[in-house]
């Protein structure tokens, strides 16, 4: 029996959320409501200028295993932080959530990645992301024994861009395959798909058992506006294909069957960040517990609905209790 149910590899990022006026953005030439990458100098300056706020650990795959852990799965994470304040915040948070995290912090090089999120009175979020140390992850951070002892290796498309993390993930796939374990992959973003369409297709055709993506990502992968055609193509490769559809729920194809699962109602959507991450975490946690594919998707939807009801991409409610009440 594997030591861990799910091992994720991904970006280790801390979300810093602060409420500011529109003038705060305009005076710095930042477009209201945008999502952009920034360098270390701007990250330090913006972080210093932001008012009191919340520092909440994030990162797509990290969010997923935190959600899975909250549902009772045994999880682990591999990602790089620096030996600095935000690195300590990330490490504390993910361990406190019950996730095994033993990647050594970098003592030199860029600081810990952070997403500086400015929330204006209209509720709009302007996201300024500095990837920093997490993009320096390499094969030396990989514990082959840990990979071999995880039932599912879960990888995020966001980390595919830099050469060193990509090589580390390819090495992890090889170890997982040799150990007879499953590989799960999330497309992460349309931007990722458009930049690595060939690589992602090759992965699906030979290495991936479980694929996660939303409708736009899946259509971009196969360069079509026909979502059904794109899903049919996906189903030819991945054993389990999961396509999320925001408030409409999800479609799951596996074992020769197609299941459509409706979304969960949310009284008020506060922050959609992390919805796809928590869906994947809920789905995989249910899968390793032997649930049916429709139930896996339902639990994914319940987990996603919880996280969009508050700020931050980590669950705040007791997910196990929530799922039990919904499914009963």
Image (cartoon, rainbow, N blue to C red):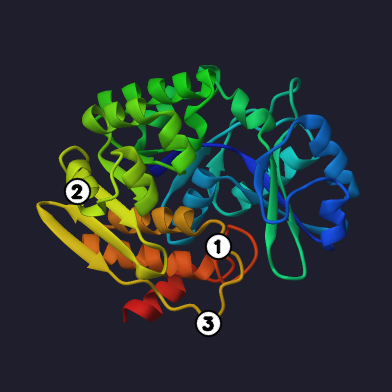
Residue 267 circle label: 3
Rounded to the nearest angstrom, the CA distance separating label 3 from label 1 is 13 Å
Q: Quadrant of the N terminus?
A: top left
In this rendered view, identify the residue nearer to me: 293 or 147: 293
Residue 9 shows up from this direction: no
- Residue shown at 12%/57% (left/top)? 257
- Residue shown at 86%/55% (left/top)? 24
Location of residue 219 in the rendering, given as x and y in whole percent from the top left corner: 32, 46
Residue 180 circle label: none
Relative to residue 119, is residue 201 drawn left or right? left
Q: Nearer the viewer, mark 3 or mark 2?
A: 2
Dot 1 alpha-carbon crowd within 10 angstroms: few under 14, some 14 to 19, many 20 or more: some
Q: Are marks 3 and 2 in contact (CB under 8 Å)?
A: no
Secondary structure state at the residue bearing disc 3:
loop
Dot 2 alpha-carbon crowd within 10 angstroms: few under 14, some 14 to 19, many 20 or more: some
Which mark sits nearer the N-terminus, 1 or 2?
2
Q: Which residue is mark 2?
A: 229
Relative to residue 257, is residue 141 drawn left or right? right
Residue 301 in the image: above or below residue 16: below
Dot 3 alpha-carbon crowd within 10 angstroms: few under 14, some 14 to 19, many 20 or more: few
Q: Are marks 1 and 2 in contact (CB under 8 Å)?
A: no
Residue 272 circle label: 1
Residue 135 in the image: above or below residue 122: above
Q: Nearer the viewer, mark 1 or mark 2?
A: 2
Secondary structure state at the residue bearing disc 1:
loop
Rounded to the nearest angstrom, the CA distance separating label 3 from label 2 is 34 Å
């Amino acid at each position: 029996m594997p030591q861990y149910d799910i091992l994720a590899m991904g970006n280790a990022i801390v979300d810093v959320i602060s409420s500011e006026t529109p003038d705060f953005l305009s005076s710095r030439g930042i477009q209201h409501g945008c999502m952009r990458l920034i360098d270390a100098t701007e990250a330090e300056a913006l972080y210093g200028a932001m008012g009191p706020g919340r520092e909440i650990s994030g990162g797509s795959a990290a969010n997923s295993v935190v959600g899975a852990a909250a549902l009772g799965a045994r999880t682990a994470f591999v990602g790089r932080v620096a030996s600095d304040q935000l690195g300590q915040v990330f490490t504390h948070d993910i361990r406190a959530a019950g996730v095994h995290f033993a990647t050594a912090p970098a003592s030199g090089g860029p600081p810990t990645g952070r997403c500086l999120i400015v929330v204006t009175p209209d509720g709009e979020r302007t996201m300024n992301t500095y990837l920093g140390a997490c993009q320096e992850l390499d094969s030396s951070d990989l514990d082959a024994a840990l990979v071999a002892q995880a039932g599912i290796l879960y990888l995020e498309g966001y980390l595919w861009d830099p050469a060193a993390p990509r090589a580390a993930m390819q090495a992890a796939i090889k170890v997982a395959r040799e150990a007879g374990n499953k590989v799960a992959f999330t497309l992460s973003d349309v931007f990722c798909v458009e930049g690595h369409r060939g690589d992602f297709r090759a992965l699906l055709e030979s290495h991936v058992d479980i694929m996660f993506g939303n409708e736009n990502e899946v259509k971009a992968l196969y360069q079509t506006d026909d979502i059904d055609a794109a899903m049919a193509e996906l189903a030819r490769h991945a054993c389990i294909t999961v396509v999320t559809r925001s408030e409409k729920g999800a479609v799951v194809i596996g074992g020769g069957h197609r299941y459509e699962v409706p979304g969960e109602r949310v009284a008020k959507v506060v922050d959609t960040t992390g919805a796809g991450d928590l869906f994947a975490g809920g789905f995989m946690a249910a899968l390793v517990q032997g649930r049916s594919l429709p139930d896996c998707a339902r639990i994914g939807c319940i987990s996603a609905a919880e996280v969009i009801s508050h700020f931050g991409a980590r669950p705040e409610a007791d997910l196990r209790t929530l799922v039990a009440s919904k499914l009963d």
